Amino acid sequence: MDYHRHDPRTPAHDDHPVKVALSASLDYVLRTGLASAVGTAMLPHFGPRGIAREKSLMPFYQALADRGEREAVFIEPPRQFSYSRERLRDDGLAALGGCADQLCFDSTFEALNPAVRAAYARHTRNRRVPVRHWTHGDRPRRTLIFVHGYSLDAYWVNRAMFSLRWFFRQGWDIALFTLPFHGARRGRFDPFSGFGYFSHGIAQTSEAMLQSIHELRMLMHYLERRGVPGMGISGLSLGGYLSALLAAVDDRLAFAIPNAAVVSPADMLMEWPPLSTLISPALPLVGLDLPTLRHAMAVHSPLTWRPLLDPDRLLIIAGAGDRFTGPRYQHLLHRHWAGSQLHWFPGNHVLHLHQRDYLRLMRDFMARCLPA
């Protein structure tokens, strides 16, 4: 089934047709830029030797997805590990009576596939995990874990874009997680943040997805040891994908709120020019097709795994004009999460029109799932 050909219409198309159309037009332009960046990262693996190696690695991940053994894929990290905390100056947060710390710990993740384990371990800068942690300073409180989008790791961007200080004023502590190969974790010579997530081949991209989940669970262990009364997760785009995946891995979450989530990466690549122009004609020439590519990435897809949270604890936020992670994919996740809540806003992937509506929805949803 070609998900990328599904009808993208939503209720917001009827309520706000002009806003949806204009925001979608802007997304086409922005998407081309991101596709070019991702294509640049992936290009070295489109040679004959690179493709042959990736094909040889695919059966390992396909078999893992077919077996459906959750514990064998998402190996639980140790509950005890060392970490450091450094107090940061944040006048805006201090004015709200809070404080900001830089939490850091060493990842205990090892690549699942023995064939790439040594190569993956050589990314030494990627092993140190930074988390910006906002606390009220009086006692451990309910905590919102937030996961940024691809190449969008700047704390100030996420703070402003998702009104995180507003949630802080509602009484929530906030933990802003930094994804592998982003920020201080990027390779020394990477041209941009996030480059390494896709520049080492499909197999290592799968390992990066699994590493992200492993480290988010380490963060949950830390918060649990700290004595927080509960925690939930939200994230944008790639962060939304991982938020949705974590809901199928760790039942300690009180809620999961993926926002403009990536849902089926293989399918999305087929509608992102110029990346699609490169991939689509190349696949049959090297003996691959879309179902095979989808199968190779299924091990880390939230569509592969049944969520561990009840449907009333799952909320999907989606843009009707989004052409990065289009409406068809949000419908797909909503169907997989039968009984979950789906909210449409009339903007695109980065321009979230009527955002106040979904922020208030999130506030009430979070408070219901995890009362003060």
Image (cartoon, helix red, strand yellow):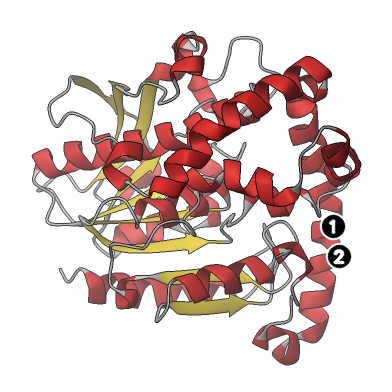
Q: Is residue 98 left or right of residue 371?
A: right
Q: Residue at x 50, y 78 (%)?
A: 342
Q: Residue at x 86, y 65 (%)?
A: 25
Q: Is residue 100 left or right of residue 205?
A: left
Q: Which residue is mark 2?
A: 25
Residue 295 lies, in percent from the top left, at: 59, 47
Q: Which residue is mark 1?
A: 28
For the C terminus, give its image quadrant.
Answer: bottom left
Q: Amino acid at mark 1?
A: Tyr
Q: Residue at x 73, y 26 (%)?
A: 41
Near mark 1 (Cα within 10 A), the count class, few <14, some 14-19 or many ≥20, is some
Q: Amino acid at mark 2?
A: Ser
Residue 103 against residue 133 in the figure, above or below: above
Q: Do residues under tags 1 and 2 come within 8 Å of each other at their CB atoms?
A: yes
Which quadrant would residue 18 be assigned to in this image?
Answer: bottom right
- Using the image as rendered, state which of residue 75 and residue 325 is in the foreground: 75
Residue 139 lies, in percent from the top left, at: 9, 48
Q: Is residue 248 left or right of residue 263?
A: left
For the N terminus, give its image quadrant.
Answer: bottom right
